[in-house]
Image (cartoon, grey):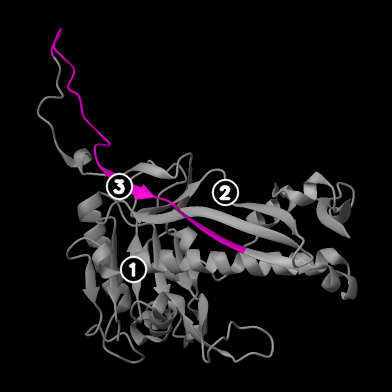
Amino acid sequence: MKSVYYQRNLQTGLLDVKEFASDSQLSLLRISDPVATNLVQGYTNAELKGDKFLTPVKMPKRTGRFPAFGQEAFVISGDLKRAVGARVARLNVQSGFVTLTMDEYASGVSLENSEREEWAGAPDMLLNGRLLTNTARIRLYREKLQAEAMTTTTNYASGHYISGAGKAWGGAGSGDPVADMWDLQELILKKNGRFGNVAFFSWGAWLKFINNTAVLNRIKYGGSAISPAQMSEAAAAQLLHVDEVHVCGAVYGTPSAPGSDGGVKKSALTKAFLWDSVQSNNAGIIIRGSGSGIESAFGYTWEHQAYPKVESYYENQTKSQVWDEQHVFNPAITANEAGAMYYSLA
């Protein structure tokens, strides 16, 4: 019996299948698979948007104090003018913190020898498909945590989460979504001294926004009729004075029958939009931080700098090569006044 591992061919860029004997020490040990690790690090899903709001920041420890931010910068201090020989006024910054423990999220896939032998294509095709599906499951869970952090009302400061039940965004309703979103900008500006730089819409809220008469009237020119299809994320960003607008369209599925996991020939999943799962029709604006993690921002996604990683080993009992993928991260809100949101928009 032989075990296999995969190595990137520097000439072709493809994965070459390598074999080692079952009595080799490599087949008895869990080894870090650098090729598979690079593969899962590079995979992205176009509909996953959480990292565009809660910026990922690499950290060396799983547990510790992560920076939170106060409002020291807004104090007009009377002791800044210094006389000759006088002491320099000192500011104790970064005194706030969030105590956080990053969690590990892991999932594995296996490739049995018989599957590899009967597979019509190259073995790396089958392996890559499984690795990417495995990564997609972990990344979707990451998106779930980020979406819950962004759409849970109590994660925002008092007065920064507002019911949209009476805003009348729907269709030809009398509401003015652009004016409402600018009200959120004013809340953020007053508390932070700067505008929010990124806006988000759940799928339900976006449909109301792009079909709203007041919104479409704002982008009319020359008396031409405007259709909802002409309202893009870029056009919305100009209206809201933000760098980016992101429509969060990630979809998740729940089993419609016991034992269903979305597999082929199993019961179909019931699909729903992830960013409408806490409550429906959410839209907001936040201050997004840079990758340094030290800048005041609504939140970050803390990641352990040694992850993700994939470990590979041969399992004799099942005659399979196994790849276990591990991620260590957690999203956290660090400045709850640096964002504002409407929920349950109607």
Q: Nearer the viewer, residue 124 or 32?
A: 32
Judge whether residue 92 is colored magenta.
yes
* Separation of residues labelled 3 and 1 (CA atoms): 23 Å
Q: Nearer the viewer, residue 126 or 323?
A: 323
Q: Label 1 crowding class (10 Å Cα cut-off): few <14, some 14-19, many 20+?
A: many
Q: Quadrant of the N terminus?
A: bottom right
Q: Which residue is drawn at the image coordinates 48% and 78% (left, top)?
A: 231
Q: Which residue is mark 1?
A: 284
- Residue 290 position, x and y percent, is 44, 47
User: Is residue 196 something that shows in the picture?
Assistant: yes
Q: Which residue is mark 3?
A: 98
Q: Earlier in the sequence, mark 1 or mark 2?
A: 1
Q: Main secondary structure of the magenta part?
A: loop
Q: Which residues are magenta?
A: 83-107
1 and 2 marks in contact (CB < 8 Å) = no
Q: Is residue 105 left or right of residue 191?
A: right
Instruction: Name which quarter of the figure residue 89 lies in.
Output: top left
* Circle 3 SS class: strand
Q: Which residue is mark 2?
A: 307
Label drawn at residue 29:
none
User: Is residue 234 something that shows in the picture?
Assistant: no
Q: Which residue is drawn at the image coordinates 15% and 17% (left, top)?
A: 82
Q: Is residue 284 left or right of residue 164?
A: right
Query: Can you tell which of label 1 and label 2 is closer to the viewer?
Result: 2
